Image (cartoon, rainbow, N blue to C red):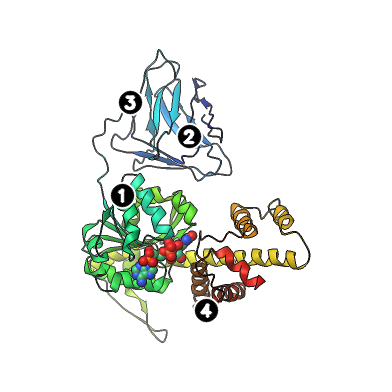
């Protein structure tokens, strides 16, 4: 077994009790290794990616048998280890000539490449890939280099992707060009030259402008090319973007992210997606670079199911009428998970986060108003069931007067506004979010838009 701990020390125990030892750099969360060329490799063409959202970074590596197949799973009961591989068998084979099976496992580089070598001087460990078939190199486009886009693009580049960038304020591209990115002159040019174009901009208007504005994506998109909307927007915007992109033969996925600037830089975002399932699959190496996990929230339907559904369609007045799907539309509808589901889920999550943040600020200021120590309030809070990195970091920052943006206040207020509007349309009450929204609006009036969301605190003290 292989335990990653903060000290970096490890112990490795093969399932057959043969001793194995090694170490992994604890700061690396993902380790990639082409499968070794042992006869036991079920798939010679695949690259195995092991990623762990487990903050404890506890992994179990075991060798279950004489074939020396190395299996990786999580030792840590509350945490989930994701082993994702284009190989359906998800087996990493390490073949060792060393009878003692003494291994060193380390990840020395920022690209998170796993290297395995022998600790045992007389013995030779062989890790090799006979596979000449690397996954095809996709040309990736990225529009929007704000707090989120910057971290995402850095991680795409670190993981070896070929990335073309564009940003409205062109100077923001310079840093990435130095890191190896290419420069796109317009969104249209990026979409026309890249296989998959991602966008991560401030909100619904910017997302629409980027696609439908002058020199927008729509002018460059070609049949089969993918467009992935990562901005947090409302489901109606997603539906509209999906329609215009697919009307030009493009393929569409929405993929908003949960996280912060820090998590974006760390490649630890949570990606929610819906739309064309085939795009979701094509994005897997990108999503692995930018996030710790991804969800597909649309449910693609089978052709038979869709065909049956297509025959009866509701029309105004409650009547039903027959409709017919062409073969092309039928296929498009099959692969298309309900675009808009990810936006809905994202808004609900951000509504909870924004309301929670406002409540924490309210607690801190009430503590002060009633003569209680804010630090003690935080200490007690962080010992209880509500303890979390989020609470700890945001409160510490507030107490230090540090409102440097990790998640812009203006964006969380936008999310609250969109969530409230979604509740309105569903005729569902959202009084907590509505109250929180008012406090954020007050904070915006106090010129806090470009500070972190924790600056909502200032709305209570002014
Ligand atoms: N920050 C977070 O922690 C976080 C977390 C989850 C989700 N999100 C969501 O992710 C998205 C991006 O957030 P962010 O924090 O990266 O925002 P940001 O730092 O404010 O960046 C916004 C980006 O949008 C671009 N933009 C704005 N209006 C535009 C327009 N009309 N046309 C073209 N480009 C335009 C900006 O270009 P310029 O550089 O020229 O201004 C910039 O690249 C938002 O939808 C946000 O809600 C953010």
Q: Using the numbered discs, state the Cα–Cα distance from disc 4 to disc 2 in whole angstroms.
A: 49 Å
Disc nearer the start of the sequence (1/2): 2
Q: Nearer the viewer, residue 154 or 177?
A: 177
Task: Tell me, yes or no, if residue 335 can be seen here.
Answer: no
* In the depicted structure, whether residue 88 falls above or below residue 375: above
Q: Using the numbered discs, state the Cα–Cα distance from disc 1 to disc 2 in whole angstroms.
A: 27 Å
Give the label, 4 or 1, closer to the camera.
1
Disc nearer the start of the sequence (3/4): 3
Give the label, 2 or 3, closer to the camera.
2
SS assignment at label 3? loop
- For label 2, the crowd category at 10 Å Cα-Cα, with few meaning under 14, some 14 to 19 and many 20 or more, is some
Disc nearer the start of the sequence (4/1): 1
Q: Which residue is mark 3?
A: 38
416 left or right of 279 in image: right
Q: Position of residue 236 (x, y in %)?
A: 40, 74
Q: Residue at x 28, y 74 (%)?
A: 213
448 left or right of 43 in image: right
Q: Find residue 25 and name its label.
A: 2
Give the label, 3 or 4, closer to the camera.
4
SS assignment at label 1? helix
């Amino acid at each position: 077994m292989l335990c990653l701990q903060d000290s970096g020390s490890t112990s490795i125990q093969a399932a057959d009790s043969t001793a194995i030892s090694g170490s992994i750099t604890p700061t690396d969360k993902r380790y990639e290794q082409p499968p070794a060329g042992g006869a036991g490799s079920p798939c010679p063409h695949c690259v195995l990616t092991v990623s762990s959202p487990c903050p404890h970074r506890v992994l179990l590596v075991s060798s279950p048998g004489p074939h020396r197949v190395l299996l990786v799973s999580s030792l840590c009961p509350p945490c989930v280890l994701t082993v994702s591989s284009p190989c359906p068998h998800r087996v990493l084979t390490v073949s060792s000539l060393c009878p003692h099976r003494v291994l060193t496992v380390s990840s020395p580089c920022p690209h998170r490449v796993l290297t395995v070598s022998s600790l045992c001087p007389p013995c030779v460990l062989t890790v090799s890939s006979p596979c000449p078939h690397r996954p095809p190199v996709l040309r990736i486009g990225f529009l929007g280099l704000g707090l989120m886009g910057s971290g995402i693009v850095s991680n795409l580049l670190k993981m070896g992707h070929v990335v073309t960038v564009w940003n409205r304020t062109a100077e923001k591209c310079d840093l990435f060009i130095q890191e190896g990115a290419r420069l796109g002159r317009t969104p249209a040019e990026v979409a026309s030259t890249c296989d998959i174009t991602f966008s991560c901009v401030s909100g619904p208007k910017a997302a629409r402008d980027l696609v439908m504005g002058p020199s927008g994506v729509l002018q460059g998109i070609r049949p089969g090319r993918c467009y992935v909307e990562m901005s947090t927007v409302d489901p109606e915007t997603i539906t509209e973007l999906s329609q215009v992109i697919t009307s030009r033969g493009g393929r569409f996925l929405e993929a908003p992210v949960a996280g912060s600037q820090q998590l974006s830089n760390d490649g630890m975002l949570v990606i929610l997606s819906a739309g064309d399932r085939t795009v979701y699959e094509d994005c897997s190496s990108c999503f692995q670079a930018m996030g710790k996990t991804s969800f597909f929230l649309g449910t693609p339907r089978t052709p038979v199911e869709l065909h049956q559904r297509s025959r009866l369609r509701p029309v105004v007045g409650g009547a039903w009428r027959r409709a017919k799907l062409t073969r092309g539309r039928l296929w498009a509808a099959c692969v298309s998970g309900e675009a808009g589901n990810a936006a809905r889920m994202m808004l609900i999550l951000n509504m909870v986060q924004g309301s929670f943040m406002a409540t924490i600020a309210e607690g801190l200021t009430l503590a002060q108003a009633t003569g209680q120590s804010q630090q003690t309030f935080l200490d007690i809070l962080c010992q209880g069931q509500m303890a979390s990195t989020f609470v700890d970091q945001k409160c510490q920052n507030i107490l230090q007067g540090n409102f440097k943006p990790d998640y812009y206040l203006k964006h969380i207020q936008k999310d609250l506004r969109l969530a409230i509007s979604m509740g309105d349309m569903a005729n569902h009450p959202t009084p907590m979010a509505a109250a929180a929204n008012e406090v954020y609006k007050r904070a915006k009036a106090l010129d806090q838009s470009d500070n972190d969301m924790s600056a909502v605190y200032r709305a209570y003290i002014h």
